[in-house]
């Protein structure tokens, strides 16, 4: 399973864990991912996505999953959601 958010495109970051003695060891900062079920009213379909906590909050702010998908840039979406975005735009127009 990929450690990438399907809505926002967040990926793990690299950095150092720094001790009190200023010793640096490599570590990864992982995004806060959760499996969430979203409902698309336009397509009458439920989707189970791996989404970061900030992605869930962004969907809540826009009001619905369909509104979020319409407004977000395609470069952040997973390939599966890019196809879904096209379907939502064509059905709503």
Image (cartoon, helix red, strand yellow):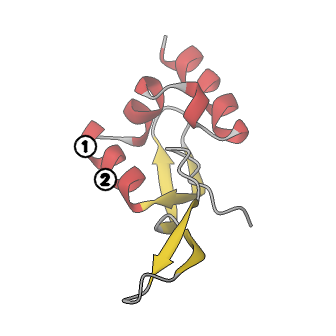
Mark number for residue 61?
Answer: 1
Residue positioned 63% across, 22% down in the render: 86
Element type at marker 2? helix
Nearest the viewer among 83 and 2 is 2
* Image coordinates for residue 65, horizontal then vertical, percent: 42, 41
How many badges with numbers are in the image? 2
Residue positioned 50% across, 25% down in the render: 73
Is 9 on the left-hand or right-hand side of 63? Answer: right
Is 62 on the left-hand or right-hand side of 31? Answer: left
How packed mark 2 is, by other alpha carbons closer than 10 Å (few <14, some 14-19, many 20 or more), is: few
| Quarter occupied by residue 25 | bottom right
* Image coordinates for residue 26, horizontal then vertical, percent: 61, 74
Residue positioned 50% across, 69% down in the render: 34
Nearest the viewer among 24 and 11 is 24
Q: Are marks 2 and 1 in contact (CB under 8 Å)?
A: yes
* Image coordinates for residue 11, horizontal then vertical, percent: 58, 54
Residue holding disc 2: 57
């Amino acid at each position: 399973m990929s450690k990438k958010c399907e809505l926002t495109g967040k990926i793990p970051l690299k950095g150092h864990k720094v001790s009190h003695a200023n010793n640096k060891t490599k570590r990864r900062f992982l995004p806060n991912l959760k499996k969430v079920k979203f409902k698309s009213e336009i397509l009458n379909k439920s989707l189970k996505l791996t989404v970061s906590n900030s992605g869930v909050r962004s969907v809540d702010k826009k009001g619905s999953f369909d509104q979020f998908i319409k407004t977000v840039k395609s470069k952040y979406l997973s390939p599966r959601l890019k196809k879904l975005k096209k379907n939502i735009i064509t059905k709503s127009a």
